[in-house]
Structures are given as structure tokens and as C-alpha cells.
Amino acid sequence: MLKEAIYHRPKNNFAYAYDEQTIHIRIRAKKGDLTKVELIYGDPYVWKNGTWQRDIMTMHLAGSDGLFDYWFAEIKPPFRRLRYGFKCMSEIEETYYTERGFQEKEPSRIDSYFCFPFLNAVDVFKAPEWVKNTIWYQIFPERFENGDPQLNPLGTLPWGGKPSPQNYFGGDIQGIINRLDYLDELGINGIYLTPIFKAETNHKYDTTDYMELDPQFGDKKSFAELVEQCHKRGIRVMLDAVFNHSGASFAPFKDVIKNGERSDYKDWFHIRKFPLIEEGQLNYDTFAFAEVMPKLNTENPEVKDYLIKVAKYWVEEFGIDGWRLDVANEVDHQFWREFRQAVHSIKPDVYILGEIWHDAMPWLQGDQFDAVMNYRFTNAVLDFFAKEKTTKSEFEQEITHVLQSYPESVNEVAFNLLGSHDTERILSIAEDNKENLLHMFLFQLSFPGSPCIYYGDEIGMTGGNDPGCRKCMIWEEGRQDRGLLKNVQELIKLRKQVPLFGNDGAFQWTNLHPDIISYTKTSSDEQLLIMINRGTEPLKVTVPNDFYGQRDIWDQEQLSDHTTIEGKGFKLLYRKTKMVPVN
Ligand code: ARE
């Protein structure tokens, strides 16, 4: 047994409150090393004749990544308190693992054990329920649809030209309103708009005024109408909050430029010394090295009050449903804690989504964000399906690694995107392979979480990195891939109609064929089996007994004991696991 590989630590992804009654416990061990793990657990205050009373539960192997196995158990401690340890067994050895380390004999002293002191309801990670059933659509407003040419900024180019960091095509809020039927038909039920507040650039990440809509996009009336129309159709609306930095034309920064050291706003930013620029060097902090994006000092109570007022205003006045937080990991944690409380005091089920590309456990403990933009998921999916550079087992391991690094409650609302305004278009990454593209949508839309489609990916738009990925949406049907669109529509429909497709079932890899990706989603009375053939050759698979005679819910083919999955094909099999009583 490789003891050095065994790891557990309470109050993170290894031991967390799943809900107000339930605690999840995980332990990590070297892959393939342990044959059985038992959880020894009990309430710390239950004693009999001077002996602490404990129970035993067998843990199950929930998944493996490249190096480790993850064992799992779920407990509902009646008094919401827990002390616990592990009995780890390999083929030749067994050992007890507790907070004190490894011991040959089961420790008798309670203070040796791991401690989950109390499950306080207020500390439980709770994301809004609606997010689990939301399929997002990300819109870059300047490039979605020009609905009101009167608002076009000077020099606006004809729709469909080559995007550059500076040019304009006149997309606006009215354009989005005009296209709500399209979004409805696609089936999405949440839109995420990149920034819409007054700013200098086409992307609007350099805010001039957080309380105004950019006049190029419309006015507050048009925005109110957008939200109202979306809500009527059951579509939620999420806006982008750029609170890490402002734009250079934000009034407080302009004041600093004008009055230097004497400015009342000099502590609103991170200024090292004056003058602000010396021999081409910036003497203040910015986003990356963007001179026009001065970093805001969110520790300053005045700045904090101002930004929190902004966050509350758009929720209170317009009823928005979510905030996506730009460069969220460079802003202090305390700011986000206060932000969450303030926003939730107005509307308790606002979805708070941080833009973090990396492991984000410290922000996902219940006191800050509900989710992060899950680029770790994105990268695993792209490497396997689009670039075809990882093997089946590498892909499975990477996905498992991401899942195991967060609590299940976090995974159920993870913002799972395939691409965004910051990344090359997925079809371009897939070198125009539409079959691989469809596999990506299938995987994304059948995976736990809250999936997001980047505008235009559903009709097969291409484009390189920023600014190439920000082309004008193609509206002429003859230039859209209508076949792909129909398939994406069907997948969205399945996600909405078959609860197992979404967050209802437990996700588990299965291994039916060495070259076929297969996974099940299982609930108490239903099961879904998905098989995907990434290769170009047809492959024969033995269908598990339980699925004989069932129909494929994608192409309605009836299954026998063997099925052939065509090159680049897939199968979606569904079955009821319990007989429904007839009365
Ligand atoms: C502009 C040009 C670019 C040029 C860049 C250089 O368009 O071609 O490369 O300047 O300075 C906004 C605009 C961009 C603009 C940028 C700066 O949308 O067009 O780029 O402002 O003016 C990291 C951050 C992450 C950030 C990405 C871009 O962690 O927060 O970089 N994303 C947000 C938004 C952007 C936005 C900004 C931040 C600024 O989503 O759209 O840019 O408000 C790895 C790293 C990540 C890194 C990621 C991407 O995975 O680990 O940390 O993200 O790559 O680079």
C-alpha cells in the first residue's frame, strides 16, 4: 500500500455538506492500490460504558484519474456532527487512517479521528435550483444582431465584415429582442451578455459608467424590455460585471489623471506613485498590462460601496437573474463575500458566476460564487473531441479529475462551456470536422452542470482567437448549417425532456469497448447509457442485458444484444430500472 498517496482533509471537496442533512466524504488513494475502504464514523457525544460508539460503512469507488482512485460515502448524521476515520485495505495489508495519520489498530481515542464539527445550514453551498435546468446562450452584443441602425456608432461597417479589436458592426439590444424567437426555437433558457454598460471599446470591458447602458446598444428602456420579454418566455438574463478594473474614462480615474495626488479618488485605484506613467512604465496596477484598464481598489470602503450599489441596482431595477464576474480571481475574497450577501438581500436566487479558468475551490465554499466558467472541462473536451490529441482513458481521467476536485453540489451547477468570446471557435479547433462538433455538443449537453452555447457555434461558425471568434452572427439561412442547428435543438430538447440527460442521474463511466466513450446516468428508477465512437470505423458493442429491446432515443433504432456504432456515430439508450406498478 502506498500510504503517501492517501489523502483526506475535512471541509473542502473531500468532506463537505451536500445539503442541510447530508455530508459527503471522499478519500484519495493510489490508483488500483486499495481493494476496499471502510468509513468508521459516529457522533462525538454518543458513548456507552466509557466507549465512543461508532458505525462502519463501506465506501464505493467513485472514479479514477491518472494517478489516483477516489472513494466515496454519503452520511446523514442524525445530530449533524461527525467524527470519522478510514480503514484502508489492499490485497496484503490493512491500516487505519485518521487525523493522526496511519495506525495498525483501530484508534480508540476519539481525538485521533477526523472532525466535521457541525453541519450549520447557513454554511451549506446553495446555488439557485433553476440553474440546474438552464441551458445558457452567450451573446457578444456588438456582433449578434443590429436591430436599430440609428444607434450605430460612427464608422459602423456592413454586417458580416472581418472583426478587428477596434471595429463596429452595430449589434444592439433591439437586435437581441428581434431574435428571441430564434433563441426560443433553439430551446435555450438563459442568456449571458458580455458587458453592456457605457464604455469606449466594442467589447465594453473598459467601463466608463456602470450605471448607464452603452448608447450604442440602446437605453435602459430597451434593456428593461429585453428582460421582460425574456422572462415571459422563461429565459433568464445574466450580465457581466467588470469590477476588477474600470476603463480609463471612468469619472474617478479621470479625476486622478486630472488632479494627481490631490484627487479624492486616488485611493480608488492601486497607484504606486505619481506621475501615473513614467518613461513608458505604468505606475498603477491594471488588468494584464492594459493601460486603459486601471485596477479598482476593492478594499477601499468607498469603492466597495459604489460597486455593490451597482450590483444591486441592476438586480433591483431590472430583475436580472445572474452576474458573471470578470477576472474574478484577481479581486479580494472579502469583496465577493459582501457582494454575495448584498445581491442576495435583493433577490436570493441570483446566480453568481466567477470568471476563473483554474481550480477554484476557495471561491466555491458557499460564501462567494455559485460556479466558475469551467474551462478545465472545456479543455478536456476540446483535447479529446476537437483536437483528438488525448486517448479515451486520458479523457475519462481528466473529466474525473475535474469532477473530484469539487463537491457534487458544485458540479451540478458548473458553467460548462465549449468556447467563448476569449477562445478560438470550437469548429475551427476541430478543423471543420462537424461530426466531432456534434459529439462535443452531445457530451456537453448530457453532462451534469449548466451548459452554455457560444452564439453561432450551433450553426457552425468558425473563427480564430479574439478577435476572430467575435464575427457577426450569420442570419442568412443558406449560410447556416441547418443540419447542425437541428441536431443541437434536438439535444437541447432531450436535456429538457429526459431529466437524466441533465442533472438528475449520477454520472459514471462504463467500459464497453476500448475505443468507445461510454457513460451512464442513473437515478433510482431510470438509466441512460450513452456511447460515442470518435473513430471513423464502425465498431461492434455488446449491449448490456438491461438494454435489450430498448429503442435508441436519438434515432429510434431497436436494440438487440449487439449493436454497431458507425464511425463518428453515437447511441443514446434509455431504460426504466423499476417496474411501474399497474393498478
Ligand atoms: C485585447 C486584444 C487582444 C490582446 C489583448 C492584450 O483584443 O487581442 O491579446 O488586448 O492586452 C477584454 C477584451 C479583449 C482585450 C482585453 C484587454 O475582451 O479583447 O484584449 O480586454 O484589453 C486571462 C484572465 C481572464 C481574461 C482573459 C482574457 O484571467 O480574466 O485573460 N478574460 C476576461 C474577459 C475578456 C476581457 C477581460 C478579461 C478584461 O473575458 O474578454 O478582455 O476585462 C489561460 C490563463 C487565464 C487567461 C486565459 C486567456 O488559461 O490561465 O488566466 O485568462 O489563458 O488568456
Image (cartoon, grey):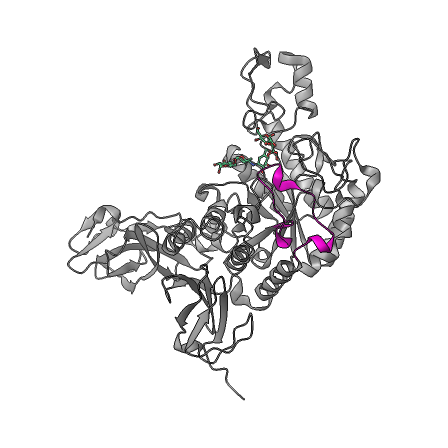
**Is 32 left or right of 530, judged from the image as shown?**
left
Image: 75 above or below 545? above
Whether residue 3 is visible here, answered yes or no, is yes
Q: Quadrant of ligand 1?
A: top right
Instruction: Give 512 or 148, whichever is nearer the viewer.
Output: 512
Residue range in magenta is 454-481
Instruction: Give 385 or 575, whichever is nearer the viewer.
Output: 385
- How far from the left and from the top, in percent, is residue 67? 30, 49
**Is 37 left or right of 369, judged from the image as shown?**
left
| Quadrant into which the C terminus falls | bottom right
Place residue 61 in its image quadrant: bottom left
Image: 579 above or below 239? below
Residue that appears at 54% across and 27% down: 288
**Is 125 left or right of 16, judged from the image as shown?**
right
Is residue 464 in the magenta section? yes
Place residue 219 in its image quadrant: top right
- Outermost residue on the bottom side: it is 583
